[in-house]
Image (cartoon, rainbow, N blue to C red):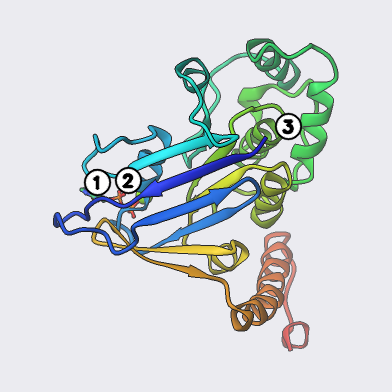
């Protein structure tokens, strides 16, 4: 599906015109949205989620085009944007399989092997495996988010996925991003994690509620990403070791 997400600048919190006038993303692209708390990241995601039409505080316009035309109201109503936020909790008393089957039915997808596929993919994103007969309410925060990402990647028709600061979610965040991109989703992600910022080819810098500048990851930054990735792996290793009651020695981290 040739989807394109277009964002047209409006005004920042002070009412000034935003320096970034237009952003265009295609299937498989990902955009990292960065900036301090209060800089307007969540507002931008909300504008995208609602496909703002000059009718939000930022006065931005957002269009999602599928094969170069805007989807009709019926398609829009069935959601063109999937959202993953920090606060995701299931309240249904049902198994993972029951949930996935129900979701497949609501999307008018043929019933079948969805649950197995979704669970296998989810288990590549989270250290603690779940099973098809696990109860939703018993899943940890990390398992819940892994399930939602796998569900979005495999089942949702929504061409765009919004992610608001999931770094502490207990999932392999880089793998999650690559799974979504690999399934052709347009991913827009607010994040404070330097590795995630550098994992996206584009980076939007926010301040005072406005889109300040749009950067592409440079060759130099790609090299930094490799160095940081090695550091990140060491941090992760130390964390796992210490969590399991182990001890660390300086030689490990040289
Ligand atoms: N362009 C804008 N115009 C008007 N208000 C804005 C704009 N951008 C953000 N805000 C408001 O500023 C506050 C902080 O923005 P928010 O998106 O929550 O920041 P962040 O997610 O980066 O912490 C919110 O109340 C939001 O509604
Ligand atoms: Mg926010």
Q: Which residue is mark 3?
A: 154
- Mark 1 touching mark 2, by CB under 8 A? yes
Front residue of this view, candidates 82 and 54: 54
N-terminal of the two: label 3 or label 1?
1
Q: Look at the numbered disc 3 and give the secondary structure of its residue.
A: helix
* Mark number displayed over residue 43: 2
Q: Which residue carries the number 1 mark?
A: 58
**In this picture, is 157 found above or below 77?**
below
Q: Nearer the viewer, mark 3 or mark 1?
A: 1
Crowd band around label 2 with a 10 angstrom C-alpha radius: few (<14), some (14–19), many (20+) = some
Does the beta carbon at disc 2 come under 8 Å from ligand 1? yes
Looking at the image, which residue is at 79% across and 23% down? 115
How far apart, in angstroms, are the residues tagged by discs 1 and 2?
A: 8 Å
* Picture coordinates of residue 161, whole percent (x, y): 55, 40
Q: In the image, is residue 191 above or below residue 101? A: below
Ligand 1 neighbours mark 1 (CB distance < 8 Å): yes
């Amino acid at each position: 599906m040739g989807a394109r997400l277009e964002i047209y600048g409006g005004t920042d919190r002070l009412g000034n015109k935003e320096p970034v006038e237009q952003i265009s993303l295609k299937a498989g692209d990902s955009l990292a949205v960065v900036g301090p708390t209060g800089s307007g990241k969540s507002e931008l995601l909300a504008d995208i989620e609602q496909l703002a039409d000059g009718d939000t505080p930022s006065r931005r316009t957002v269009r999602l085009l599928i094969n170069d035309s805007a989807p009709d109201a019926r398609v829009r109503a069935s959601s063109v944007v999937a959202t993953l936020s920090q606060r995701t909790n299931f309240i249904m008393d049902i198994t993972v399989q029951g949930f996935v089957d129900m979701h497949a039915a609501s999307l008018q997808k043929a019933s079948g092997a969805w649950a197995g596929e979704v669970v296998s993919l989810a288990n590549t994103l989270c250290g603690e495996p779940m099973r098809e007969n696990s109860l939703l309410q018993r899943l940890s925060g990390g398992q819940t988010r892994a399930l939602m990402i796998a569900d979005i990647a495999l089942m949702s028709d929504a061409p765009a996925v919004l992610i608001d600061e999931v770094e502490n979610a207990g999932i392999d965040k880089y793998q999650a991003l690559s799974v979504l991109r690999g399934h052709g989703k347009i991913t827009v992600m607010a994040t404070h994690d330097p590795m995630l910022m550098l994992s996206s080819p584009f980076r939007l810098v926010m301040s005072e509620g406005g889109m300040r500048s749009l950067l592409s990851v440079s060759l130099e930054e790609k090299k930094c990403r490799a160095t940081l990735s090695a550091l990140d792996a060491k941090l992760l290793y130390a964390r796992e070791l210490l969590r399991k009651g182990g001890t660390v020695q300086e030689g490990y981290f040289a």
